[in-house]
């Protein structure tokens, strides 16, 4: 069954690439907002403190978007967690009434998406027709972040199907992807990165989509993306950045081994900074 699922994932990815279903780089839009991508495994006190500072302080309104979880009380634990870390006005996004949901998003200074299943989260937001509202709130200046699945959805191309990914080779269409929120259009985010040994799946992904930079974030570690594109690392673990944009790459069909020279690899830790801008864009 596992091999069958892997084969299906490979086929679906290849079809998606052929159909150009991935909005990897949408129209450029200046954003006033910041992103906070946490790799899962716990959000540290330092990351929480910085998040509250970035959104404007503890009095600002925080909205939990818990739909990555299938639990009935999804969001309650996050409300308690953030209040313990200083946030005073923390609410949960409810999808039953779209107008109320839209108002909640438009009034939020900090939108936070806890972990779970990123596909479930995106489906819920798409079905409720709330994706545009989140994008608009981000572009208007809100801090938007998440951990684990909540980090994976931030990019335009989102890695899915963790159980079906090929972790033992680097092959064409070896990583299943779909559309994310599109708030970080130059990147594709992978989470629990070092802990779960996901380098091969991120490498396969960016070689399939060489216009994107892979950002692998380990547990208890965050990347903050500022409006000018500057990024900083905060937390206990590593961030691995794989940039294929200047590589010389030989074509590989779905299932074939990739071949490329000249990729750029960065291994970053707490306090390090980086940018995804190309040299002629700086």
Image: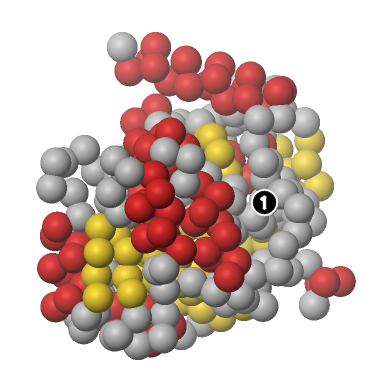
Task: Indicate the colouring scheme.
Answer: secondary structure
Residue 245 horizontal/vertical position (percent): 75, 54
- Counting the numbered discs, the total is 1
Q: Nearer the viewer, residue 94 or 116?
A: 94
**Within 10 angstroms of label 1, few (less than 14), some, or many (20 or more) residues?**
many
Residue at image position (77%, 31%) is 251
Q: Nearer the viewer, residue 30 or 269?
A: 30
Q: Up-down: is 254 above or below 35? A: above
Residue 36, can we see it?
Answer: no
Q: Which residue is mark 1?
A: 212
Q: Which element type, helix, strand or loop, lies under badge 1?
A: loop
The quadrant of the image that shows the C terminus is bottom right
Residue 239 horizontal/vertical position (percent): 46, 66
Residue 270 horizontal/vertical position (percent): 41, 81
Question: Left of 99 or right of it: where is 225?
Answer: right
Question: Left of 139 or right of it: where is 95?
Answer: left
Q: Nearer the viewer, residue 78 or 189?
A: 78
The quadrant of the image that shows the N terminus is top left
- Image quadrant of residue 54? bottom left
- Image quadrant of residue 266? bottom right
Residue at image position (53%, 65%) is 138
Residue 123 horizontal/vertical position (percent): 41, 35
Residue 13, can we see it?
Answer: yes
Question: Left of 116 or right of it: where is 125?
Answer: right
Residue at image position (63%, 19%) is 15
Residue at image position (57%, 60%) is 136
């Amino acid at each position: 069954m596992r091999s069958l699922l892997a084969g299906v994932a490979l086929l679906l990815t290849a079809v998606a690439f052929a159909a150009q279903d991935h909005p990897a780089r949408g129209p450029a839009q200046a954003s006033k907002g910041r992103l906070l991508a946490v790799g899962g495994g716990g959000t540290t006190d330092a990351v929480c403190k910085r998040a509250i500072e970035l959104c404007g302080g503890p009095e600002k309104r925080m909205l939990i978007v818990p739909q990555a979880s299938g639990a009935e009380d999804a969001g309650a634990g996050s409300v308690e967690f953030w209040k313990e870390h200083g946030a005073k006005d923390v609410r949960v996004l409810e999808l039953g009434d779209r107008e109320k949901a839209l108002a909640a998003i438009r009034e939020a200074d900090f939108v936070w998406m806890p972990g779970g299943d990123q596909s479930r989260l995106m489906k819920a937001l798409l079905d409720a027709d709330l994706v545009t509202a989140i994008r608009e709130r981000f572009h208007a200046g809100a801090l938007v972040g998440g951990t684990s699945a909540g980090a994976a959805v931030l990019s335009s191309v989102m890695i899915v199907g963790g159980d079906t990914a090929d972790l033992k080779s680097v092959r064409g269409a070896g990583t299943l992807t779909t559309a994310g929120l599109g708030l970080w259009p130059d990147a594709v985010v992978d989470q629990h990165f070092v802990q779960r040994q996901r380098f091969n799946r991120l490498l396969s992904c960016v070689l399939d989509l060489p216009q994107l930079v892979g950002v692998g974030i380990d547990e208890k570690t965050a990347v903050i993306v500022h409006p000018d594109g500057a990024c900083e690392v905060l937390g206990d673990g590593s961030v691995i950045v794989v940039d294929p944009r200047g590589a010389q790459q030989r074509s590989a069909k779905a299932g074939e081994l990739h071949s490329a020279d000249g990729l750029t690899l960065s291994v970053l830790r707490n306090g390090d900074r980086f940018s995804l801008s190309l040299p002629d864009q700086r």
